[in-house]
Image (cartoon, rainbow, N blue to C red):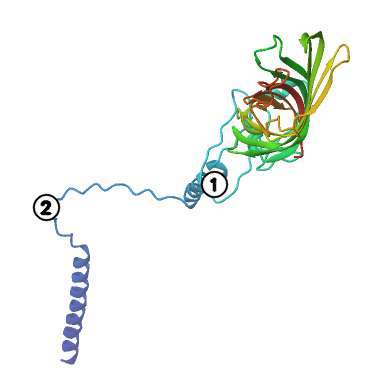
Amino acid sequence: MNLKYAGILTAFAVSAVMAQNTASVAETAAPAPAPVAEVAPVQAEPVVEQTPAQAEDKFTQAEKELAPETLFSEPTAVRGADAAKPVQKKTTKKFVYRPVYSPSEIETSNGPVKTVYVSEVASADTIDMNQLRGLIPLKFTFGFQGFIGSAFLSGDNGHYEYDRYFGLTWSAGAFALFPLDEYNMAFKTGVLFEHDKVNNSYSEVYKENYGEYRFSFSQYRISLPLLFSLKSARSNLYFDVGVQPSFAISDTFKMKSSDKKYNIKEDMMDNDYRSAIDWSIIFGFGIRANRYVGFDARFCWGINNQYEDYNAFGINNLTSKSFNVGATFYVF
């Protein structure tokens, strides 16, 4: 009996184990449920991933574009049709351009080539911007002048046919130049010590005696030229125009006859026959040959009667004229 029940229980146990294994296999092999509806997928923009090398290249390119050497181009030549023009940009850094000759000019020059550097202030090895552009500025200066030329006294006294006196004049003194703008206009003044000696001779009846008479004037004066000096911005040639007051300090009149009967000498200053101040209009031109030397020419036209109160010998209506050439020496 016991063996019979034991066998039945064993059979039930084996059946239960087998049934459990069969359920596990069925669950594993069961198919997935079918989808209810199919939805078309949305096509998104493809995302391109950059490699580290590509990102580094972009950063390097941007850095090069912002570099100062690409923002400011340096000219390759300062003359010729292919001369480069500098690009002006605002920056806190200071750039110095070095103008050089182009290769073609070096090949055809057949001579030594020197590199010229441009600076704000010219030195032995550089040129400034005015020299590079061919401009000649006006600067304050002073120096010394000397002139020599021809002097004339002329008038119409109504008694004598010839009342023209001519001779030699010279002057020497100092001057100063004050610029009124950068290139074109300056005021020039100074002081000159001048001497004129003019004479004339002609035949005339004087006190019922016929003969040849010789007249002469010897004058010393101090002159103060007040001139405007005008020139082109690219030239050392200038023109002067202005007025000149002259203060007489000595004036001697002489008359001699051919028969030596008459020998008259009068001090026109002591006798108050001479005007105290003479006025003249000045026209002139000159050129500054280099830094220290220049050459000038001037014409002085007197506008007042020098001997208004003297009525003898027909010399009461005389005005002066002179033409002078000279040299100018600049201190700096």
The foreground one among 209 and 60 is 209
Who comes first in sequence, dot 2 or dot 1? 2
Which residue has dot 1 on it?
Answer: 67
Q: Is residue 154 above or below residue 205?
A: below
Q: Which of the image's four quarters has the C terminus?
A: top right
- Amino acid type indicated by mark 2: Ala
Of the numbered discs in the image, which one, if any, rests on residue 332? none
Residue 1 picture quarter: bottom left
> What residue do we see at 21% from left, 62% from top?
29
Picture coordinates of residue 97 (x, y %)?
63, 39
Picture coordinates of residue 292 (x, y %)?
77, 34
Farthest bottom residue in view? 2
Mark 1 neighbour class, 10 Å CA radius: few under 14, some 14 to 19, many 20 or more: few
- Amino acid type indicated by mark 1: Ala
Regarding mark 2 in the picture, which secondary structure is present there? loop
Q: Does residue 145 show up? A: no
Residue 296 picture quarter: top right
The foreground one among 87 and 220 is 220
Picture coordinates of residue 132 (x, y %)?
65, 33
How many callouts does the rendering have? 2
Say whether residue 205 is left or right of residue 5.
Answer: right
Which residue has dot 2 on it?
Answer: 37
Residue 211 picture quarter: top right
Farthest left residue in view? 36
The CA span between labels 2 and 1 is: 60 Å
